[in-house]
Amino acid sequence: MRKHLLAVDVGTGSARAGVFDLSGRQLARCVVPISVHHSLPNHMEQDSEEIWSAVCAAVKAALVESGIGADTVLAMGFDATCSLVVRDGDGKPISISTSETPNVDTILWMDHRAIEETEACNAISDPVLGRFGGRLSVEMQIPKLLWLKIHRPEIWAASGLIFDLCDYLTWRATGSTKRSHSALASKWGYTPEAPGEPPLEYYRKIGLDDVMKRAGLPSRSEPPALAIGHLSAEAAVELGLDQHTLVAPGLIDAYAGTFGLFAAGARPKTPLSTEAALIAGTSSCIVRLSHEPVSGPGCWGGFRDAAFPGLWLTEAGQSASGAFLDHIVKLHPAGGTPMKARHRAILDAISEHLDKEGPDFGLPIAVLPDLHGTRSPVSDPLLTGTIAGMDLDQSLVSLHKLYWRSCVALACSIRHIMEHQPRLAGAPKQILLAGGLADHPLLSQLYADATGCDVRVPKDCDAVLLGCALHAAVAAGAFSSVEEAGKAMQFAMSHFPPSPRRQAALARDHALLKAMMRHRDELAALASSPDKTSAPLHQAR
């Protein structure tokens, strides 16, 4: 009997595979690292063959750890970052790297090479931009495609299949070139309701009139509730499965986490307008669900059916959160290698400092964490971060102070983003938090205190993987609806209510964040125009 599900989540630095049963119990979870290549500043690249090998290794290891047989796996799902995989018409990799390293065929989501192309895309009046807060992001696929056509015409001419990473994975698994609505609506400009249609007129206006041929794009996107197909013979062998396993449409990784949290997270029922998902990782995404489309500056969406059939999704977030904390650990003399265990050890030590010294621990350090630009409430990849209040101390305690003040700044930035979301979205009172280090109680409590919201965190469950598995179960017909699947696969959540005492200290920290935003504007104005002594305050409102 086929009663198990496989979920694969490909993040920036690793591929994770999880095995679940139809009650939502996680039987195994295995992680395999993947490389990131930095050929030039702002150029971040990957090898999709390495990614697929990591996926296969993680799946095989998870199967062994779970003790189940391949003949019991009903379906599998994939979610991934919104990276861009470039292949020729025969499906062979084309190196997009400026170093011309063979097989480096993937432009990572956080690659910023296409800043000029992004501005060109945003200078063209078109309804497509309205679905992205008025501006496309350099992290999306359309500017990257334009960069390839302009700067690497030989690659563009040789291309025949260009995928969002989650669609590349379903292609490798099934051989089907069908594309998911989750990716095409949110990153490629397809119409927001599944099945979505390509924005052909906008593509023409910006010079991508031949993108349908070069990327092998479909005329319609695939809705979330229908399977793409079965595993191919080749993929079944590579994954250690059999050809009877169904494959669901791919999901953007943050949307898989949102799907798991909203569908299966056990919590008091509240209106959609009062809940938000916060998916933390290399970047952080704030995702809202609604019955009507919601859009506005600094938001991507609304997209209907991008995660939940029939519901609209709106996204905002930070371009670098986990990546920023990794950067702090790597740069500090006492830091070391920023593995998850190292981060947790630092957070454990900070908890002890806070117990002894109170909420002022780490002052006078103040941090503006925008080291990789911003998504929300201002979409600007050129904005930078600031660290103030540093001295010459290189001790372990100085690392703890800097790390904690960076965490505080990230949490206050989430509050700042939420305060600038469209009114139609509603004011969140409850945050469903998952991903990265979200399960560390110090950070869970920090986000509750910084936002004033009740925070709920999955207990002993990877919500992103479970969301991907739940999505696969629905696509395979194991359940008649998302609601039925969510009840069957429900997981417990820990509750972190905001503390009034700690909120007072964080109000000061929020004011520090906004002051640093104003100072950044003033310094930028002085640097660009020495005769000016002030600048417009475009973000710290």
Image: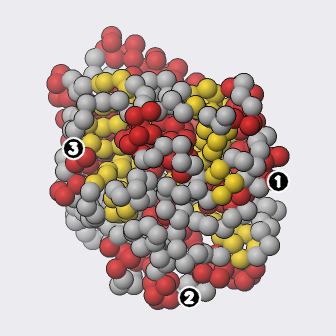
Label located before the other in sequence (3 or 1): 1
Q: Does any portion of residue 67 appear in the rendered image?
A: yes
- Which quadrant, please, contains the N terminus? top right
Q: Position of residue 51 (x, y in %)?
A: 71, 50
Q: Residue at x 36, y 83 (%)?
A: 126
420 or 287: which is nearer to us?
287
**Label 2 belongs to which residue?**
209
Q: Percent x, y for residue 205?
A: 47, 89
Left or right of residue 400: residue 469: right
Q: Is residue 395 visible?
A: no
Distance between mark 1 and mark 2 Cα atoms:
35 Å
Q: Is residue 425 left or right of residue 344?
A: left
In the displayed structure, 63 sits above or below 523; it is above
| Residue beneath disc 1 | 234
Q: CA distance from mark 3 to mark 1?
A: 46 Å
- Screen quadrant of the C terminus: bottom left
Residue type, mark 1 in image: Glu
Counting from the top left corner in percent of width and height, residue 448 is at 28, 31
Find numbered disc 2 in the image and state the secondary structure of the residue it sits on. loop
**Mark 2 or mark 3, which has the lower sequence index?**
2
Residue appearing at x 38%, y 76% in the figure: 128
- Which class describes the residues within 10 Å of circle 1: few (<14), some (14-19), or many (20+)? some
Foreground residue among 453 and 246: 246
